[in-house]
Image (tube, rainbow, N blue to C red):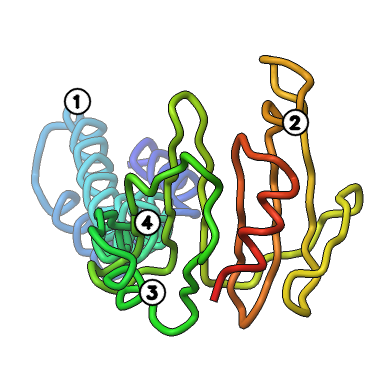
Amino acid sequence: MNKIRDFKNIADDIMKDVKVDEDLKKKTLQKCLKKNYRPINKVLIVAACFLLIIGIANLSHILPLKNQENLDITPENNLMMSVDDTESIPENSGNNILNAEEEKSWVIDTLDNAKGDFESTFIIPTYIPEDYELEKINAYGFEEGKAYKIILNYFSEDKSFMIIQEKGQVENKFGNYEEFDINGTIGFLNKNISTEGENEDSMNIELHWFKDEVHYLISGLITQEDAIKIARSMK
């Protein structure tokens, strides 16, 4: 009996930090002690009771503690993680690409039709250097028939120039350009010697001017005098 009491004391000391219902523990021990077994089996009976108590403790206390230590695997936490992941995806990224307008280009057959597509700010030159002919009119816009830019292409054998009319404000950065009057508007002219020679016929001319929020440009292998004359003739 002393061995049983000693073992019980040791078991109580070991189990002091384990949360087990006292009534359940007492009832379990009492049932074990009521059995009329031989002395040689008394220690085994108490040991069996002790193992039973440990099993109950594992189910009621230890396992819940393990669950608490692994809170990161709960459904609520997984839901939060999935929300965070979705925030990193740009919203409607695919729709933005699909909805983006694409620039269109088309060919116009006459200057009158070009004026109709560009509207009232389109102006037509009344002077063109000898031997140059208008061969192609290109229009650009986001809807055919409504152009924001038109290019007139003129050719004479191996030389050419173009007249560009484009809607929109353009920042004036023409510090090194010569200035000329273009019908009451300042024109900015730059000329570069081409690789073909140093005579005026081989000059690559750029003449810019701005009026009514339209950028006008004459560019190509023509003389400075012809570029200015073309610009002043445009109405």
> Which amino acid does the dot numbered 4 rest on?
Ile
Looking at marks 4 and 3 on the same chain, the residue that comes earlier in the sequence is marked by 4
Q: Which residue is mark 4?
A: 89
Looking at marks 1 and 3 on the same chain, the residue that comes earlier in the sequence is marked by 1
> Which amino acid does the dot numbered 3 rest on?
Phe
Quick check: 10 left or right of 115?
Answer: right
Looking at the image, is 157 positioned above or below residue 17?
Answer: above
Quick check: 36 left or right of 158?
Answer: left
Q: Which residue is mark 2?
A: 200
What is the x, y in percent for residue 51?
24, 39
Mark toward the viewer: 1 or 2: 2
Looking at marks 2 and 4 on the same chain, the residue that comes earlier in the sequence is marked by 4
- What residue is rendered at 46% in x and 42% in y? 132
Mark toward the viewer: 1 or 4: 4
- What residue is rendered at 67% in x and 59% in y? 229
User: Mark 3–mark 2 contact, CB under 8 Å?
Assistant: no
- What residue is rendered at 30% in x and 72% in y? 112
Quick check: 35 left or right of 6?
Answer: left
Q: Nearer the viewer, residue 168 or 211?
A: 211
Mark toward the viewer: 3 or 2: 2
* CA distance separating discs 1 and 4: 72 Å
Looking at marks 3 and 2 on the same chain, the residue that comes earlier in the sequence is marked by 3
Q: Residues within 10 Å of mark 4 (few under 14, many from 20)?
A: few
Q: Residues within 10 Å of mark 3 (few under 14, many from 20)?
A: many
State the residue lying farthest toward the front.
130
Q: Which residue is mark 3?
A: 118
Examine the image and state in which quarter residue 74 appears.
Answer: bottom left
Give the total number of marks visible in the rendering.
4
Looking at the image, is 144 positioned above or below residue 51?
Answer: below
Mark toward the viewer: 2 or 4: 2
* CA distance separating discs 2 and 4: 59 Å
Quadrant where the image shows the N terminus: top left
